[in-house]
Image: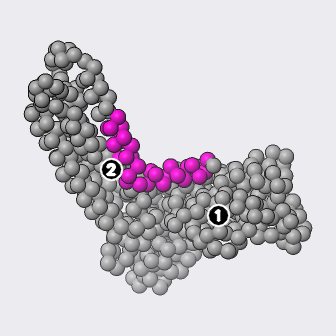
């Protein structure tokens, strides 16, 4: 339930309607509150308030009408600028980056401020009565409307600056890099049950010998991307039904309807209710998210780099900036303990087998495509080798260092085909030898 709630909140945060809707509701409540205050106070008390708006019905209508009309125009302009920024982001950085722009709370608040001020002005405007016997002018409410209009001007200035800075490539790369660091902090270690990080000497010995023969697959109920897995629900189900679950997919994978989602042991425990429970533990959707998928955030930086290396753009500096951000994130990841695939309950009994994303997987996701598309770029090739030399001191296992060495070898071999200048090849060779030395010194 906690995982699903988190995904729901993330989905709402990625929408342009949720925050503005909340602000409109607050504006409606504020209008009723200020009007009630005006109706409760005597006219003499309001007249003694030097800061309160004091003109009659006609003036109040005029100023509120001006505020409402201007807010509609400004909101339309702000929305148009936002759409243009989204189009630019999609074409320059990739469609996967649109989600990051839509999660921008600043833009959501800006749109919400303009719309809320418009709605507030309309609601207050309807209460102004110019009839002599029943004349009513909500002075406090009109004053508050003027205050909202002044605040909207400040928000507009912020929006112009924010829109210009948010589409700068360095800003986008830095933001994605920070999000990648947040994902690493959140997911490693990822725990299912107690003592998830405990490394067993022979964990496979705890798997029943007849597991392959007597286990039964649970099929996916839909074709979609796995956005998150409710670890607590899976563990509770396994304990309650006395099961051993082996997950066949992890967050970020695309599953086809009818394909195995998990393997359940023993097979006789499988029923319609259990199938529904296990399927419900997998949060799925039409696109990948970064909640439990570290490769999604890595791929965002890779996509920016690959697009920058395309012949139509030919911007190696942006690709190098992405490599620098990836190397910093991989250094961060190399220092984190990757949780074991074997997850135990409070009684130290194996309940769930779930292969986590390893450091090797992250290295492959970060370097493969940039290496392939940047094979002819001397600057990108050298920076990849320099990144490997930077990452090497942070690694702690032979497997991780072997992965770095493998990529260094592939980069060096690819340079022979992609780089024809002899002196450039010499520079690449120097970086390659420095990377190998850094790896072997660990």
How packed mark 2 is, by other alpha carbons closer than 10 Å (few <14, some 14-19, many 20 or more), is many
The answer to whether residue 294 is above or below residue 306 is above
Taking the spot 81% from the left edge, 45% from the top edge, the residue there is 346
Q: Secondary structure at mark 1?
A: loop
Quadrant in which residue 76 is drawn: bottom left
Taking the spot 39% from the left edge, 72% from the top edge, the residue there is 307
How packed mark 1 is, by other alpha carbons closer than 10 Å (few <14, some 14-19, many 20 or more), is many
User: Is residue 185 found left or right of 160 in the rendered image?
Assistant: right
Quadrant in which residue 410 is drawn: bottom right
Instruction: Please tell me the numbered disc located at residue 250.
Output: 1
Instruction: Please tell me the numbered disc located at residue 191.
Output: none
User: Is residue 109 found left or right of 153 in the rendered image?
Assistant: right
Taking the spot 18% from the left edge, 32% from the top edge, the residue there is 128
Q: Which residues are magenta?
A: 2-29
Quadrant in which residue 45 is drawn: top left
What whole-number distance in Å separates the C-alpha atoms at marks 1 and 2?
Answer: 33 Å
Residue 382, position as x, y percentages in the image? 45, 70
Residue 209 seen in render = yes
Q: Name the foreground residue: 219 vs 351.
A: 219
Instruction: Please tell me the numbered disc located at residue 107.
Output: 2
């Amino acid at each position: 339930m906690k995982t699903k709630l988190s995904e729901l909140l993330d989905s709402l945060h990625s929408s342009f309607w949720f925050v503005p809707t909340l602000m409109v509701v607050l504006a409606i409540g504020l209008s009723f509150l200020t009007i009630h205050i005006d109706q409760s106070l005597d006219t003499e008390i309001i007249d003694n308030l030097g800061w309160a708006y004091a003109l009659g019905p006609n003036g109040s209508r005029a100023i509120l009408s001006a505020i409402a009309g201007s807010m509609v125009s400004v909101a339309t302009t702000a929305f148009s600028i936002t759409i243009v920024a989204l189009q630019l982001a999609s074409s320059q950085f990739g469609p996967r980056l649109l989600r990051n722009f839509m999660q921008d709370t600043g833009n959501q608040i800006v749109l919400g401020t303009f719309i809320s001020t418009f709605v507030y002005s309309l609601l207050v405007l309807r209460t102004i009565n110019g009839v002599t016997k029943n004349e009513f002018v909500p002075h406090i409410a009109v004053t508050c409307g003027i205050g909202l209009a002044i605040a909207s001007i400040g928000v507009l200035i912020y929006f112009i600056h924010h829109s210009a800075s948010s589409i700068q490539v360095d800003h986008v790369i830095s933001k994605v890099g920070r999000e990648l660091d947040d994902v690493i902090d959140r997911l490693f270690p990822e725990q299912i049950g107690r003592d998830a990080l405990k490394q067993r000497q022979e964990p496979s010995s705890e798997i029943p010998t007849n597991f392959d023969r007597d286990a039964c697959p649970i099929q996916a109920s839909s074709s979609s991307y796995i956005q998150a897995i409710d670890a607590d629900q899976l563990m509770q189900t396994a304990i309650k039904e006395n099961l051993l679950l082996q997950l066949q997919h992890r967050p970020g994978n695309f599953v086809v309807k009818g394909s195995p989602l998990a393997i359940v042991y023993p097979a006789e425990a499988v029923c319609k209710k259990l199938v529904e429970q296990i399927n419900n533990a997998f949060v799925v959707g039409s696109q990948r998210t970064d909640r439990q998928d570290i490769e999604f955030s890595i791929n965002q930086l890779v996509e920016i780099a690959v697009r920058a290396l395309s012949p139509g753009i030919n911007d190696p500096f942006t690709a190098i900036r992405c490599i620098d951000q990836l190397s910093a994130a991989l250094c961060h990841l190399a220092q984190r303990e990757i949780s074991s695939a074997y997850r135990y309950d409070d009684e130290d009994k194996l309940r769930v087998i779930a292969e986590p994303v390893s450091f090797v997987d992250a290295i492959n996701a970060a370097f493969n495509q940039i290496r392939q598309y940047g094979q002819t770029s001397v600057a990108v090739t050298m920076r990849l080798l320099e990144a490997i030399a930077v990452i090497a001191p942070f690694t702690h296992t032979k497997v991780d260092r072997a992965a770095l060495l493998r990529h260094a070898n592939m980069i060096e071999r690819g340079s022979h085909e992609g780089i024809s200048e002899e002196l450039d090849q010499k520079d690449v060779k120097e970086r390659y030898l420095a990377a190998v030395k850094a790896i072997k010194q660990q």
